[in-house]
Amino acid sequence: MSRPKKFQEVDRKLAEIWSNNPNSSATAIHAELVKEPISPPKLRYVQYKVAELKATARKLEPQAELRLWEHDWYNDPEKAPVLLALHYVRTDVEGSDSTGMYVEEAKWALKIARFFDLSSSVHAYLLFRFAATYANGELIAKLLGKPFDTRELDTALLEFSGLFRGQRPKVTLWLVRDFLSDLKRLRPEYLKDPKTEELGFLGFLEDPVIDAVNGDVTTGIDRWKQLEWELAKIERERFISEGRFQASGDRDWERSADKVYFDDQENDVRSQAADLYETPEGKAAYELFSKSISVHIHLRFP
């Protein structure tokens, strides 16, 4: 008998947080789960699941880094251009100190490369992010002992590439915006790529806003959902960054540049939320948004 859907979601989110920072304690992971838009489990359950995840991970083959020109795939004229483009785009965007591409990520990149135009640096970066998302989803499925359900990612990929027409699934919109927001933060000059105009036309670069004339409350609710999602994303990235910071041997996290960066990001989102709440349409949308969510939310107003 399968577990209820809400417990499956908790297990998936728990495994996702743990996989991003396997050295984190169950207490730290529980604290992150409380911030997620789900009903968080008890600490004892998280402790049990973390121990289970560690035991499962020890049975899996460790992730191997794909070193430049040292893998047989680089001898394949079909694969070498893809791998080379991803290596240099990722290094340029995330810095020379970033970890290399894992074999699992490369496998997915080679599978889906034809959906992207590698003459565009933006498309090359998006290919890497899609591939990494597939690879991470596959890892989480293995940790949970479940089949990897790719339907949501497949739909996003097909819709992004233009092979699916009609109403865009929300997962596609938020997923691609997530990738592009990171690119804008790290390498804004990439967005001058001609392909960016196409992405903007498709709606991937524009934030949804309330129609000031018609007072579109539905769009306003989507805006609140986006701000809530952005805060959750910042919290997650801050958690991962702190874990890596401490693992490097540094201890003064409170004074680190990374913490200052994430604090500034959070303040910016909260400022946007405060401005939105000041408008009649934004306040009305917030009331509907807050009532529609029965779990902890980051954005709270009187």
Image (cartoon, helix red, strand yellow):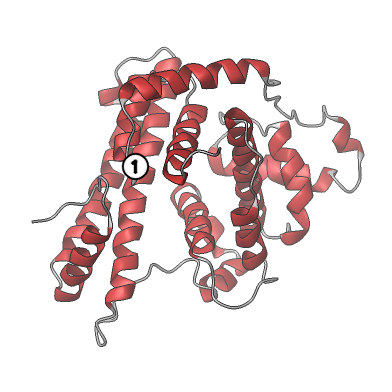
Q: Position of residue 271 (x, y in %)?
A: 20, 55
- Label 1: few (<14), some (14–19) or many (≥20) C-alpha neighbours in 10 Å: many
Say which element carries label 1. loop
Q: Nearer the viewer, residue 192 or 205?
A: 205
Does residue 168 sit above or below 27 in this rendering?
Answer: below
Tell me which residue sits at (44%, 50%) in the image.
185
Q: Is residue 87 visible?
A: yes
Tell me which residue sits at (86%, 37%) in the image.
74
Q: Position of residue 265 (x, y in %)?
A: 30, 46
Q: Which residue is mark 1?
A: 36
Left/right placement of residue 300 relative to residue 113 reads: left
Does residue 271 sit above or below 221 in this rendering?
Answer: above
Q: Is residue 91 visible?
A: no
Q: Quadrant of the N terminus?
A: top right
Q: Position of residue 258 (x, y in %)?
A: 35, 32
The residue sitting at the top extreme is 249
The residue sitting at the left extreme is 302
The residue sitting at the front extreme is 1
Q: Quadrant of residue 266?
A: top left
Does residue 157 sit above or below 209 in this rendering?
Answer: above
Does residue 162 sit above or below 121 in this rendering?
Answer: below
Q: Amino acid at mark 1?
A: Glu
Q: Nearer the viewer, residue 255 or 219?
A: 219
Tell me which residue sits at (42%, 12%) in the image.
249
Q: Quadrant of the C terminus?
A: bottom left
Left/right placement of residue 181 relative to residue 280 reads: right
Q: How many marks?
A: 1
Q: Position of residue 83 (x, y in %)?
A: 77, 42
Left/right placement of residue 145 relative to residue 28 reads: right
